Structure formats: structure tokens, C-alpha cells
């Protein structure tokens, strides 16, 4: 069992490493790893698998989902309103459909992404019953999560996925029927694994009381997560509706996003489901992918502290200019939550989330904060383009509002990215099935060797001559 004493011992051992030697190693590692940046252009390297105009290099085909944010006309990118599709269905139509009927939509969305069609009432009931039956964790896995906490919930999630390998009856199987069964179990259990991992962390690392609540049959994924996270297990219908919406919007975003592509890459090696999903989970952990809303929240906290009047457009614009000049913020010169690799005029996920975020802000008496978000969304692109010859279209992306929503739901920041994973595991499983069914070769892009020092061959030198 992890204890604070053991944690302290580990920290002391790390600190005892010779600092001078570590700095020497770092300098050596940097020298041998550094590549002349002009060589990327010389050899036409598609860094980040992106073309020079920022668009993605076409590396595969998918029927799972797609995003559309611009058109190319005579080699020029022309901005358009963003659209997102799940299996060909406009996500806005999907969301408005289940919200109009006042029911949760994440389970229906999962069915659509895995099976390629919307369920009828009987199929949806059967699907929800199956997910209900799989939400509770096998005792060995539950015990492992509770007894071996991690300081980072995403690490715990990935470790839990790998631990589930040991409880599976056919862990290495790659036939479609088995992978489908494993996928359903992971989709059902991800929210439970994240909730238990958080409770364990708060108990062992922060001394809080440990409570472990079982998921409740008949409740949605969003409702169960709120039940398992909150000490009183209470929530309002609007809170559950908004969390459910977040899960729907994050469930899939095309095969080119980093974690979905990771799923394709690892699956192409013919490895097991648990390894592929664990890899995708750790890909999502990075601040450039799943952790983006955390950067938004940290920056928004700074802006709120710095401004006296949250409705003063001039003061807001001036502070955004300071961020862009690297005089404020984290020194990156970026206004987090604005801009996207695909979307230009609008991110459809942000549009949908903003509608409901306003409702929740009204119910929580936090409209002043909502107006500040709106002002930054409106003023940010203008300030960004003030001194640019070639104007760039910037829109608020989904991360701009999702962190604010989670904060209003009293969800700890530690769980922002895990919530993304609870949702996105659906897309990962759909992409894994697609990769397996279509049987492509192992993913192996090329890297050009440029030599250690220039293009000269380096001779081997005998040990006593070095």
C-alpha cells in the first residue's frame, strides 16, 4: 500500500542524485538530440504530420467521425462555420434530438459510434442495461485502484486499463467479437475507474476520508459519475444534463486527433485492446490534447484576479494584449481556448456547450464570469489580429467553456482530463475496431537519418582512445 512515508522516501532518493552529473547528462542529451531546424524544410518533413498550410497529412480513411472547418479553393484555405459529424450525423442534430426529449444522450452516442446507426427505443434500453451490468469493477481491479493510488488520475486510468488485462478471459484476442466485448466493458467502466482513482488519491495523498460508492443501475454515465464523486450523491437535472452534453461532445473527433491516431498506430501492431486503449489514454494526458481546458482555467483565474471590472472591454483587451506580448500569462504568448487546428469561424462543440453553460451560470449566480468568457471570446480574435498583415480566423474551441462548466459542477481540476477520457474511450474503441476490421499494415512513417554531426559518418573509437 502506498503511504506518505514511502512517498517521502522516494522523493529523498530522487533529490539525492548528483545535480552536477544530471546537468552534464542533460547537456550531452541535448547536444546529440538537437537537429538543425532548416533541415525540416530542406527535406520537406511534415512535422506533426501537417502540411505547410497547417492542414493534416492524409494518412487514413475512417467512417467513425469527421470534422469540417474550412474549404480549400485554388490552394487557399477558406474559413467556414464548423461542423462535426458522428457516423455522418450532424452532432448539433444529435444533441438537439435527445435534449428535446429531455433524456441523456451519451449512451445513445456510444451506440451510434460503435455500431454506425442510432438505436431504436428497444435497442437503446437493451444497450443501457448492458452498460449498467458492466459498470461495477471486478473486485481485484477495484482493490488495485484503491490500494495503489497515483498522483495523476490519467496515470491511474491507464494503469487500471492495463490491470483489466489480467481479469479478462481472452486478453490477447484480436477477433472482432472479443474486442467488441472488451470495448463495451471499458466504455462502461471508465467512469468508475476514474471516480475510484480520484477518491484514492485524495485519501492517501491529501488525508481526506475515503468513500467508495457503487454505480447505480438505471442511471446514465453522467448521473453515475456525479453520484460517485459527490459525498451526498446529489445533483440537479441541469447538472446531469450539462455533464452528459460534455461527454457527448468529447466522444469522438475524427481519426486524426492525437489519441485516436495513437489507437490506430498501436492497434496496427496487432497488440491487445488494453495496450491500445492505455496508450490512447496517456496520449490524451498531455496538455496539448486532453489537458487544454486546464490551461484555459489557469489563465482565466489570472485574468479574473487582474481585472477590477469583468465587464470593462477596454481593460480586458489590454490584458489580452499583455498575454500576447508575453508580459502576462505563462509566457507562451497564447490566449488559451481560442483557435483550433481545423475549426476557423466556429467550433460546433463550443457553440452547443455555450448555450447550456449560460443556463448553468444563471442557476449558479455566476453570470459575471460568463460575461467575461463571452468578452474574451469576442475581443480575443480582434486583439490577436491587430498587427498582423494576414488576418487569422480564431474561434473559441470546446476547451474554452468546458473547464468553466466543470468548475460550476464542482468537479475538481484533477478530473477534467479523466472526464475527457471517460467520453473519448468510445471513439478510441470505434477506431480500434475499424483498424482491425480493415486489416491495414503496421503504421510506419519514415524518418530520414541525417547523421550525428552534419552528414559525415562517425568513426568508432576504441575505449582506451576516447
Image (cartoon, helix red, strand yellow):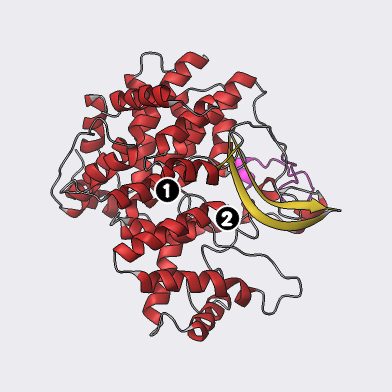
- Where is the N terminus found, in terms of image quarters? top left
Real-space CA distance between mark 2 and mark 1, rounded to the nearest whole angstrom:
14 Å
Can the viewer see residue 427 in this picture? yes
Is residue 79 toward the left or the right of residue 317 in the image? Answer: right
Q: In the image, which residues are magenta?
A: 447-466
Q: Is residue 271 above or below residue 148?
A: above
In this rendering, the count of numbered labels is 2
| The label number, if any, that marks residue 335 in the structure image | none
Secondary structure of the residue carrying tag 1 is helix
Q: Residue placed at 27% from the left, 28% from the top?
A: 137
Q: Position of residue 138 (x, y in %)?
A: 25, 24
Can the viewer see residue 13 in this picture? no
Closer to the camera in the image, 238 or 57: 238
Q: Is residue 272 above or below residue 220?
A: above
Q: Residue placed at 45% from the left, 58% from the top?
A: 355
By secondary structure, the bulk of the magenta-drawn segment is best described as: loop
**Mark 1 or mark 2, which is nearer the start of the sequence?**
1
Closer to the camera in the image, 188 or 98: 98
Secondary structure of the residue carrying tag 2 is loop
Residue 454 within the segment the image draws in magenta? yes
Residue 224 appears in which quarter of the rendering? Answer: top left
Q: Position of residue 140 (x, y in %)?
A: 23, 25
Q: Is residue 94 above or below residue 272?
A: below
Is residue 427 toward the left or the right of residue 298 in the image? Answer: right
Is residue 163 toward the left or the right of residue 294 in the image? Answer: left
Q: How packed is label 1: few (under 14 Cα within 10 Å), some, or many (20 or more)?
A: many
Task: Identify the residue position indicated by label 2 in the image.
Answer: 347
Q: Is residue 424 above or below residue 170?
A: below
Task: Identify the residue position indicated by label 1 in the image.
Answer: 246
Amino acid at each position: 500500500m502506498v503511504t506518505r512515508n514511502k512517498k517521502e522516501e522516494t522523493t529523498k532518493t530522487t533529490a539525492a542524485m548528483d545535480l552536477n552529473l544530471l546537468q552534464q547528462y542533460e547537456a550531452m542529451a541535448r547536444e546529440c538530440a538537437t537537429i538543425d531546424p532548416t533541415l525540416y524544410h530542406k527535406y520537406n518533413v511534415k512535422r506533426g504530420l501537417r502540411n505547410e498550410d497547417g492542414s493534416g497529412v492524409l494518412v487514413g480513411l475512417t467512417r467513425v467521425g469527421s470534422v469540417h472547418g474550412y474549404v480549400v479553393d485554388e490552394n487557399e484555405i477558406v474559413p467556414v462555420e464548423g461542423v462535426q459529424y458522428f457516423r455522418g450525423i450532424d452532432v448539433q442534430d444529435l444533441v438537439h434530438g435527445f435534449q428535446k426529449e429531455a433524456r441523456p444522450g451519451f449512451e445513445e452516442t456510444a451506440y451510434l459510434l460503435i455500431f454506425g446507426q442510432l438505436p431504436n427505443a428497444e435497442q437503446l434500453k437493451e444497450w443501457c442495461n448492458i452498460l449498467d451490468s458492466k459498470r461495477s469493477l471486478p473486485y481485484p481491479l477495484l482493490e488495485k485502484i484503491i490500494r495503489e493510488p497515483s498522483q495523476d488520475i490519467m496515470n491511474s486510468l491507464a494503469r487500471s486499463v492495463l490491470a483489466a488485462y489480467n481479469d479478462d478471459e481472452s486478453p490477447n484476442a484480436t477477433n472482432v467479437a472479443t474486442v467488441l466485448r472488451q470495448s463495451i466493458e471499458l466504455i462502461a467502466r471508465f467512469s468508475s475507474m476514474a471516480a475510484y482513482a480520484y477518491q484514492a488519491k485524495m485519501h492517501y495523498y491529501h488525508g481526506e476520508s475515503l468513500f467508495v460508492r457503487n454505480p447505480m443501475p438505471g442511471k446514465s454515465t453522467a448521473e453515475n459519475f456525479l453520484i460517485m464523486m459527490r459525498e451526498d450523491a446529489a445533483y440537479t437535472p441541469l447538472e446531469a444534463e450539462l455533464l452528459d452534453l460534455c461527454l457527448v461532445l468529447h466522444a469522438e473527433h475524427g481519426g486524426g486527433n492525437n489519441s485516436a491516431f495513437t489507437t490506430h498506430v498501436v492497434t496496427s501492431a496487432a497488440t491487445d485492446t488494453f495496450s491500445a486503449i492505455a496508450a490512447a489514454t496517456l496520449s490524451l494526458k498531455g496538455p496539448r490534447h486532453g489537458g487544454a481546458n486546464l490551461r484555459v482555467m489557469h489563465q482565466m483565474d489570472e485574468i479574473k484576479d487582474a481585472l477590477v471590472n469583468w465587464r470593462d472591454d477596454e481593460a480586458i483587451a489590454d490584458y489580452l494584449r499583455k498575454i500576447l506580448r508575453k508580459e502576462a500569462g505563462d509566457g507562451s504568448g497564447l490566449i488559451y481556448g481560442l483557435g483550433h487546428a481545423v475549426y476557423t469561424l466556429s467550433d460546433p462543440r463550443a457553440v452547443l456547450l455555450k448555450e447550456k453553460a449560460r443556463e448553468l451560470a444563471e442557476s449558479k449566480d455566476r453570470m459575471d464570469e460568463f460575461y467575461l468568457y463571452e468578452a474574451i471570446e469576442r475581443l480575443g480574435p480582434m486583439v490577436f489580429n491587430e498587427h498582423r498583415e494576414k488576418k487569422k480566423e480564431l474561434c473559441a474551441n470546446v476547451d474554452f467553456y468546458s473547464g468553466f462548466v466543470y468548475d460550476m459542477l464542482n468537479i475538481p481540476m484533477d478530473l477534467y482530463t479523466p472526464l475527457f477520457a471517460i467520453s473519448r474511450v468510445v471513439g478510441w474503441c470505434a477506431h480500434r475496431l475499424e483498424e482491425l476490421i480493415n486489416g491495414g499494415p503496421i503504421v510506419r512513417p519514415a524518418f530520414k537519418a541525417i547523421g550525428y554531426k552534419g552528414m559525415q559518418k562517425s568513426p568508432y573509437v576504441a575505449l582506451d582512445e576516447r
